[in-house]
Image: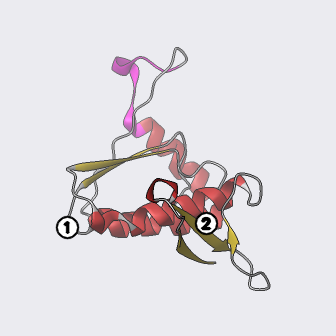
């Protein structure tokens, strides 16, 4: 995986742009990131790495990342999550990652706070929710190799 950002200088300033160039395979040359050329997961990886690379250029109290892992394969999701954790745990703004799913066994640090929100008509009412029962189901699944 490799990439670079190129300035697309035009004759008039308001026509300037940037080209995000990416490569996901060793036998390819850098190609422009477009809606048609790369897969959804490749676009997500490229977008997330580009945004992370810009973090030191802007000041804000927090950042929100919404479902960036959609379309990513498990390997790239782990890589991006690791990079996001490194960035979020460095001095700077707070990060909020919103996602309907996370891979099991992701690496977390003590500098992180995880909030899990369950919602929907099919959910067990809060007063009936038993954390120990949920943990026991997960422990049993781990013992069974799931």
> Of residues 121 and 91, which is closer to you in this image?
91
Q: Which residue is mark 2?
A: 76
Q: Position of residue 37 (x, y in %)?
A: 77, 60
Residue 77 in the image: x percent, y percent? 58, 61
x and y percent of residue 1 in the render?
Answer: 64, 78
Question: Going by the image, does 110 lie left or right of 116?
Answer: left
Residue in the foreground of this view, choosing between 134 and 89:
89
Image mark for residue 91: 1
Is residue 127 a member of the stretch shown in magenta?
A: yes
Secondary element at tag 1:
loop
- Residues shaded magenta: 123-132
Q: Position of residue 122 (x, y in %)?
A: 55, 17
Which callout, 1 or 2, points at the residue further toward the start of the chain?
A: 2
Task: Confirm whether the magenta stretch covers residue 49.
Answer: no
Q: Residue at x 53, y 64 (%)?
A: 11
Q: Which mark is residue 6?
A: none
Describe residue 89's horizontal placement relative to residue 79 as left or right.
left
Mark 1 and mark 2: Cα distance apart in space = 25 Å
Depth order, front residue of 69/111:
69
């Amino acid at each position: 995986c490799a990439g670079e950002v190129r300035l697309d200088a035009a004759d008039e300033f308001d026509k300037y742009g940037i080209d995000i160039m990416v490569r996901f395979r060793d036998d390819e040359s850098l190609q422009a990131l477009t809606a048609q050329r790369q897969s959804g997961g490749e676009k997500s990886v490229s977008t997330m790495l580009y945004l992370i690379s810009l973090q030191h250029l802007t000041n804000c109290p927090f950042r929100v990342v919404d479902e960036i892992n959609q379309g990513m394969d498990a390997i790239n999701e782990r890589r991006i999550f690791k990079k996001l954790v490194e960035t979020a745990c460095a001095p700077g703004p707070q990060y909020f990652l919103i996602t309907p799913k996370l891979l099991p066994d992701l690496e977390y640090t003590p500098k992180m706070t995880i909030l899990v929100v369950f919602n929907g008509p099919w959910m067990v009412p809060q007063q009936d929710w038993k954390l120990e029962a949920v943990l026991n189901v997960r422990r049993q699944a781990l013992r069974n190799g799931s």
